[in-house]
Image (cartoon, helix red, strand yellow):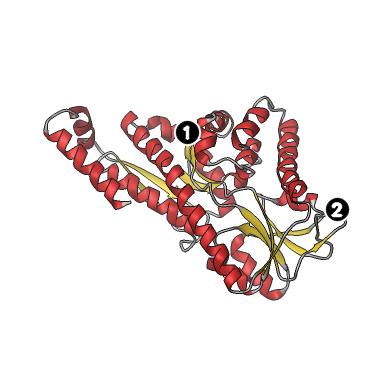
Amino acid sequence: MSKPISRTLKTLAGVAAFGVVASFASLTQAAETKLTMIHPFPDFLQYTKNCKNLVAVINERGKGVVNIEMLPFNSIKMFQQPGAVSKGRVDLVCTPAAFYARGIPENEAVSTASSSAMQARAAGGTAILDGLHQKHFNTKYLGWTSSGNRFRIYMKNAPKFGSNGLPDFGGVKMRDNPIYGAFLKALKATTHNLPSSAVFSALEKGVVDASAWATLGLKGLKWDKFLRHAVAEEFYQTDIGWMMNLDKWKSLSPAAQKLIQDTVIEFERMNYYILTGMADGETATLKAEGMKFHAVPAAATFTKMAVDSAYARMDERLTKAGRDKSSIAKLRAAFQQ
């Protein structure tokens, strides 16, 4: 990562020396714009590391133009962070789309995606979401920086499968989350809504004995101490992305806007490959350490239910809000490739 930054800075310095980018040079002499950013997960998780790496690159490339200050973890509670950005209490957030899907129901498209971030952007899906964020949530949607990492269901005990080939979660105490809650309910699971920070204790005390989680990060959270079985069929993708308060975005100079947006797009691609490789490595480690992976007999039905249940929730929320539904088909086409 440091080499592209170094090359970029050297190129800018060389060009400025010959006076070709005088407009940029004059910008750097103006007061640097200070921005604040919040994030929902602890620093040891790769998703937070990716977010902080992106901030570091923007700050390095944007010296004299823009600087982002990362606020401490949990200085704003995780589910309150999107609203805080919408209202302008903080400028930026790096957070799952599902955390504010009540405000933007169309965010289900990101959470349930089979496309990569690059495919979704090329197909126009990201631009549609950005327009919806600006219209309904007073934010600029900058991009989806965590594609390449999927979800699976982890359990203390081996899963049972019904005659229909789907998991039978009767009697299973399943931890819930806004990302996959509709899917777990469609599978008739009894769920307990808990933030990730409370799950280790809940597993230890027997409050829950199963949880869906990403294909990367279980070991960092140490949940694998209790969860020794996995439903092998993967679904959805981690849906962490960047958004910014719209008024703050509009107040930025064109140079600052371009710098931030271009770097987010660069990291969409970079993080896809990073997260894919790391998830494959963690899966191999979990298997080597004795975790049992159980195939879903009706795998195609399982994955279709995952997507259909979320889009049904999207449709229901848009109906209740009296919102236009014309973007649903376009988003599904862009994010399900």
Q: Is residue 221 visible?
A: no
| Earlier sequence position, callout 1 versus callout 2 | 2
Residue found at x 63% / y 31%: 333
- The quarter holding residue 24 reads top left
Residue found at x 61% / y 47%: 99
Q: Residues at badges 1 and 2 in contact (C-beta under 8 Å)?
A: no
On screen, residue 320 versus residue 81, left or right, reads right
On screen, residue 154 versus residue 74, left or right, reads right
Residue found at x 40% / y 53%: 52
The amino acid pointed to by label 1 is Leu
The amino acid pointed to by label 2 is Asn
Disc 1/disc 2 C-alpha distance (Å): 48 Å
Question: Where residue 164 is drawn, which disc sits there?
Answer: 2
- Residue count near mark 1 (Cα–Cα under 10 Å), binned few <14, some 14–19, many ≥20: many
Residue found at x 47% / y 33%: 246
Q: Nearer the viewer, residue 133 or 276?
A: 276
- Which element type, helix, strand or loop, lies under badge 2? loop
- Residue count near mark 2 (Cα–Cα under 10 Å), binned few <14, some 14–19, many ≥20: few
- The quarter holding residue 297 reads bottom right
- Which element type, helix, strand or loop, lies under badge 1? helix
The residue that mark 1 highlights is 246
Q: Residue 199 location, x and y as percent?
A: 64, 66
Q: Nearer the viewer, residue 140 or 145?
A: 145
